[in-house]
Amino acid sequence: MKTKIAIMALVTLLLAGCGGAEQAASDGTGQAAPSQVYKWKMVTTWPKNFPGLGMAAENFAVMVDRMSAGRLQVKVYGAGQLVPAMEVFDAVSQGTAEMGHGAAYYWKGKTPTSALFTSIPFGLNAQEMNGWLHYGGGMELWRELYAPFNLVPLAAGNTGVQMAGWFNREINSLADLKGLKMRIPGLGGEVMSRVGVEAVNIPGGELYTSMQTGVIDATEWVGPYNDLAFGFHQVAKYYYYPGWHEPGPTLELIVNQQAYASLPPDLQAIVEAAARAVNQDMLDDYTARNNAALNELVNSHGVELRQLPDDVLAELHRVTEQVLEELSAADPMFKKVYGSQKAFQEQAVEYGKISEEAYYRARELK
Ligand code: CA
């Protein structure tokens, strides 16, 4: 079987090498083989082979190639190889590349509503976010939002609850946030800026150096598994939780609308299935590896693990609601999407009390 796939892939590759779309060989079953090979480019907001987040893009490309027996080949470009990280949205929208991988909240300058498809501070966790997107109307709203940009969005990765971030100063009160220069994108950044933080967005690949040289005093990134790989413990002393700002952040795969429409239905189905698989796979990866990574950070590297004080979290929550109300008042689409997610969350919170929350409590009882 493996040999057959390898041979088919080789034949397809050789044929595809002649041009964008070629006739593929018969598959030997006597049935007419699917005729066209699609060679696509995927631009990403991550450096090539970026641990964790970037691997979703790589895994997607491998999966699609296998599932389509080489009929859809996606070449993944790291940030800056074809276009810079923050130009992924435009590049796919204009068709420079057929696909892109990143996070919707990077595009809040295009439309503030995009941030709601990554994560809302104090909002849905990963499980709830996936429920809202795939069975709660979220995906339909996302497609509506991106249609004017000539893009089809898909969820393609989720890290689960993140950490609040790495700090080079202790946060014991709200006053300690004043004047702090922190990398924190999206709505979390907007909230932080309202409590006196100088919030900036810097691409992932530049964060370590920015912390090391003191360009920033703090950064959020992901969680122990990813952050350990980055070596943030070498440039920051305190590691704060919980990730109030990103409780279940979704990564996105964006597809150029014409490119997507040009695919036959089976390849469209493969793109959707692979995105869905990658979306879950990332969560599984983080779930499996965060615990050991945190252990190593604390016990081998002497990282000081700290919880953000309750009064700081309460104020951040209060400001979050204020920001969300303001953005809703200013933008009908934002209001519509936020309204949908808020209604979903109200129910999820109630059910969570008697399911996950009650179970977490129950498992501590002996
Ligand atoms: Ca993050």
Image (tube, helix red, strand yellow):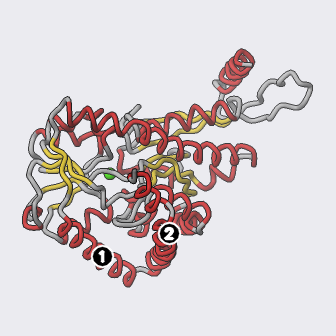
- The answer to whether residue 333 of the structure is visible from this angle is no
Q: Residues within 10 Å of mark 1 (few under 14, many from 20)?
A: some
- Where is 62 relative to 142, above or below? above
Answer yes or no: disc 1 within 8 Å of ligand 1. Answer: no
Q: Identify the residue under disc 2.
A: 348
Could you say which quadrant of the image residue 33 lies in? top right
Could you say which quadrant of the image residue 138 lies in? bottom right
Amino acid at the residue labelled 2 = Ala
Q: Is residue 186 left or right of residue 18?
A: left
- Where is 351 relative to 207, above or below? below
Where is residue 228? Give x, y as percent.
Answer: 27, 35
Which of labels 2 and 1 is toward the front?
Answer: 2
Is 198 in front, or is 81? 198
Q: Identify the residue under disc 1.
A: 323
Secondary structure at badge 2 equals helix
Is 22 in front, or is 289? 289
Quarter that holds the N terminus: top right
| Residue projecting furthest to the right | 30
Q: Residues within 10 Å of mark 2 (few under 14, many from 20)?
A: some
| Residue projecting furthest to the bottom | 329
| Residue at the spot 28% in from the left edge and 56% down from the top edge | 242
